[in-house]
Structure formats: C-alpha cells, structure tokens
Image: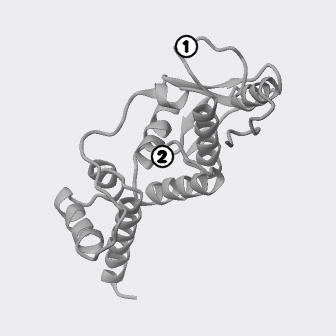
Amino acid sequence: MRLTDDRYANERSQFELALRMIRHEARTRTIRECTGLSDDRIRKLYWTYFRNSGVTGVRRRRGKSPRQITRFVKNAQHQLQSTTLVALYNAGLLLRIDERKLVHPCWPRPDVEFGHRLCRAFETYLLLHERPLLSFEWAWTLLHSICGDELYLASCAGCDSCYVQDAFALDLKTCPCCEIEAERRRRPGVKSFGGD
C-alpha cells in the first residue's frame, strides 16, 4: 500500500459524505463542518452531480440552520418523532444517555464518521415515519440541542418511557405515545399514531 492511498481514501470519504448530505438538503455550513470541504467545493459538487446532471427534487437550502427548539415539542407528533431521532442517535453512538437520563455527546466535534452516523440515523428515521416532520437540518439542530441545556429527556408518569421535553416549559409528565393514545380514545375515528 502506498502512502498516498490513505490520503485518497480520506478525500473519497469526504466526497461521499458531502453527496449524501446534499441529497438530504443539508446546508453548506453543516456539510463543511462534517467533511472539512470548502464552501466552493461543496457548491461545485451540487452543480456537477445534482443541478447540471438533471437530478430533480434536491434543493440547496440557504441561510443559517434552524435554531428554535419549539419545533421538537410543538405537539405530540413532533415530540414522538424527535424522541425517535434521539433514540437513533443513542443507538448510532452519536450521544450517550446515562442512568439518570442525562444526555452526553460522544463526539467532541463533527467529522466524517460523525456525518455518516448522522446520515444513517436520519435515513432510519425516514423509514420509520410515513410522514416525517423533521428535515435533516432540524435533525442536526436536535442533536446539538439535546446535548445542551435547552432540551432534556423526561419520564412519562403513565408508562415510564423517556421523551424529548423543553427544559423551560411545563412538563405534564405524559409522553407523546400516551398523549396520542388518549386523543385516540377521545376521538375513536383517529388512528393511534397520527394516521388520517
């Protein structure tokens, strides 16, 4: 094996991750943080592999990543999907949940492996939810917010399961599953997990 082979393997991994994140409509800054590629290189990848090649349905998002955490706890459906993502982050070793249900990041800063794990968690989330309510950028924000002080994992008084909760809002101690089930009982025509 030549010394340069390892360098090319690293560049290839950065390149593959950038394309994967572009498919999920990640913003340039998010892609740059994980891949280390320049903004110009990321834009060229988009133009070469998506815009000029005729691939439709992939847009470039502009501006800053979303920051408001109310999206994750807006209602029971948003809370359920946010909790699903946090469980996937834990399974993908992006974060660790201790015995007191405190969340700790596993990565000091994003890198290529972090980016691939994040993409894998997000892709699994898309498979689990028929109508996903969170985009890739929202998933990115959730990962950083749950490891900070804005969100935490609360325990349900009814079933003792964990769920994502706003640290500065009133917690009724009811997980989204119990809330959705209670709503279904009140309105028998509504399916259990948000179906029409």
Checking the image for residue 51, the label placed there is none
Amino acid type, residue under disc 1 in the picture: Ala
Q: What element carries label 1?
A: loop
Quadrant holding the C terminus: top right
Q: State the residue at coordinates (67%, 33%).
A: 98
Q: Between marks 2 and 1, how big is the CA–CA gap? A: 28 Å
Horizontal side of residue 194 vs 108, given as left or right: right
The residue at the far left in this view is: 40
Amino acid type, residue under disc 2 in the picture: Trp
Q: Name the residue under label 1.
A: 169
Which of the marked residues, 2 or 1, is nearer the chain's N terminus?
Answer: 2
Q: What element carries label 2?
A: loop
Is the image coloured rainbow, by chain, by secondary structure, or in one colour? one colour
The residue at the far front in this view is: 189
Total labels: the figure holds 2
Residue 34 place in picture, x, y as percent: 36, 54
Q: Mark 2 points at which residue?
A: 107
